[in-house]
Image (cartoon, rainbow, N blue to C red):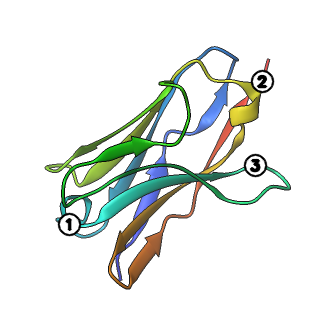
């Protein structure tokens, strides 16, 4: 059973930045799975933030107008979500997900709050 642990969330002022991390419990997961970031705002549905694919390294961030960047470190078995120019609307619980075929693992989430 793969475990994913997110970290790096917290309270940040509008316009600020945060970098979230997601570390997998098993070696090679970040290199061999599609790694995605999702978020769920209070009262809202979970939505995709972006994905980095293992097969072709395609890196797609869903309509964040260049504010968010996904990257990964194979040696650390960790995927990152760099978030810049944060807005109050970015407030949510952020989740990491690893998928490969029928395999599907989620992290427990990390809270990001953008507020003055």
Q: Residue shown at 86%/56% (left/top)?
A: 43
Is residue 30 shown above or below 68? below
Nearer the observer, 63 or 4: 63
Q: Earlier in the sequence, mark 3 or mark 2?
A: 3
What whole-number distance in Å separates the C-alpha atoms at marks 2 and 1? 36 Å
Residue neighbourhood size for the residue with mark 2, other residues' Cα within 10 Å, grouped as few (<14), some (14–19), many (≥20): some
Contact (Cβ within 8 Å) of mark 3 with mark 1:
no
Please tell me whether mark 2 or mark 1 is closer to you in this view: 1
Q: Residue shown at 67%/59% (left/top)?
A: 46
User: What residue does disc 1 label?
Assistant: 32
Residue at the top extreme, as displayed = 15
Residue 68 image point, x, y percent: 48, 31
User: What residue does disc 3 label?
Assistant: 41
Residue neighbourhood size for the residue with mark 3, other residues' Cα within 10 Å, grouped as few (<14), some (14–19), many (≥20): some
Q: Earlier in the sequence, mark 3 or mark 1?
A: 1
What whole-number distance in Å separates the C-alpha atoms at marks 3 and 2? 14 Å
Residue 19 image point, x, y percent: 45, 32
What whole-number distance in Å separates the C-alpha atoms at marks 3 and 1? 29 Å
């Amino acid at each position: 059973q793969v475990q994913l642990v997110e970290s790096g969330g917290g309270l940040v002022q509008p316009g600020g930045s945060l970098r979230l991390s997601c570390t997998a419990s098993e070696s090679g997961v970040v290199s061999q799975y599609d790694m995605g970031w999702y978020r769920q705002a209070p009262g809202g549905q979970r939505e995709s933030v972006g994905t980095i694919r293992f097969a072709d390294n395609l890196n797609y961030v869903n309509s964040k107008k260049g504010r968010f960047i996904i990257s990964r470190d194979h040696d650390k078995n960790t995927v990152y979500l760099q978030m810049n120019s944060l807005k109050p609307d970015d407030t949510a619980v952020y989740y990491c997900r690893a998928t490969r075929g029928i395999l599907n693992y989620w992290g427990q989430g990390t809270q990001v709050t953008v507020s003055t």
